[in-house]
Amino acid sequence: MQCKLVDVFSKQKLQGNGLAIFHDCQGLSKRQMQAWTREMRQFESIFVDTNVTPYRAWIFTMEEELDFAGHPLIGLSYYLHQQFGTPSDTHTWSIELNHKVVELTSRWRGKHFLAAMHQGAPELINTLSAKQSEPFYAALGIEQLQPQDLPVQVISTGLPYLILPIEHGLSKVSFSTNKLESMLEQYQAKFLYLIDVNNFEGRTWDNLGSVEDIATGSAAGPVAAYLYQQGLTTEPHISIQQGRFVDRPSEIKVELTCDGKDIVNIVVSGYVTHVGDFTLSD
């Protein structure tokens, strides 16, 4: 079985978010996909079948299958461009996931490979009151950093995130709960994303707080929508920094298409760097 390793949201190896792409995986069950993801120890892995149209992909973390994720799809573009595209052209790819089809574009920009993912319009699922928001700040040990004038919201472009704003203090986080998943479920959120609204830098974790994600493409669209709709930026082009606290600096770029005050489409993009190719024993 063939596997390609890339780093996503970085122009350099050993930065950004690592990804294992399994592109020779016909006949694997989902249980086997989960096992191979755990074997590779990446935050997420993606499995793709290019013998069907549109191409079919499955995304796994080390704990579970996801219906949607950002950096695996951005990274997958590298393999598709290398395998089926031409270096000098821009290509578009349609990827079928469990519940939606995602459009990707890819091209080389000089020596660097750039890929983009079309996320569509954001969905505002919930807006929490200040009192409802307090337990989430407490769960991260940052009760004193809860802003008075910025709401906590649940926004989705495929995966619902609870957007938790702060004005400073990303380094002060200290997890103090093992019940975050059930807390999030109350508001129809899957994960929490902490965003410094002054520097546009974020952090997110698994729901036990044991693993910090390096660069979260599925959260970038909801976060950018939040920043724009709360008046924290008037620019349709937004850059989000992530990964500093795990020594894997990453940059996620987001482009908003707006009709008046409404966001009608979100495009998340980033650079992808090739790390290596592997042959795995069956």
Image (spheres, helix red, strand yellow):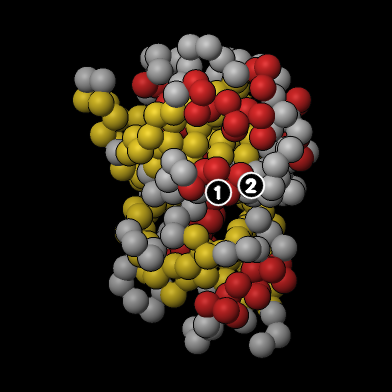
Q: Quadrant of the C terminus?
A: bottom right
Q: Quadrant of residue 201?
A: top right
Q: Considering depth in this image, is 218 or 235 the residue closer to the camera? A: 218
Q: Secondary structure at mark 1?
A: helix
Across and down, in percent, residue 111 comes to 59, 44
Q: Is residue 101 left or right of residue 202?
A: left
Name the residue nearer the viewer: 42 or 185. 185
Q: Position of residue 25 (x, y in %)?
A: 54, 80
For the N terminus, give its image quadrant. bottom right
Q: Which residue is mark 2?
A: 179
Taking the spot 50% from the left edge, 28% from the top edge, the residue there is 132
Crowdedness near tag 2: few (<14), some (14–19) or many (≥20) residues, C-alpha within 10 Å:
few
Q: Nearer the viewer, residue 266 or 130?
A: 130
Residue placed furthest toward the front: 131
The residue under the point 65% across, 75% down is 35
Above or below, 144 relative to 158: above
What is the three-letter code of the residue carrying label 2? Lys
Image location (x, y in percent) of residue 173: 73, 30
Q: Quadrant of residue 126?
A: top left
Alpha carbons under labels 2 and 1: distance apart: 6 Å
Number of residues whose C-alpha sits closer than 10 Å to that of mark 1, classed few (under 14), some (14–19) or many (20 or more): few
Taking depth in this image into account, of 175 and 55 the one nearest to the observer is 175
Q: Quadrant of residue 147?
A: top right
Q: Is residue 29 above or below residue 17?
A: below
**Mark drawn on residue 182:** 1
Residue 269, can we see it? no
97 to the left or right of 71: left
SS at badge 2 = loop
Instruction: Give the side of residue 267 with respect to residue 163, left or right.
Output: left
Q: Is residue 130 visible?
A: yes
Q: Are marks 2 and 1 in contact (CB under 8 Å)?
A: yes
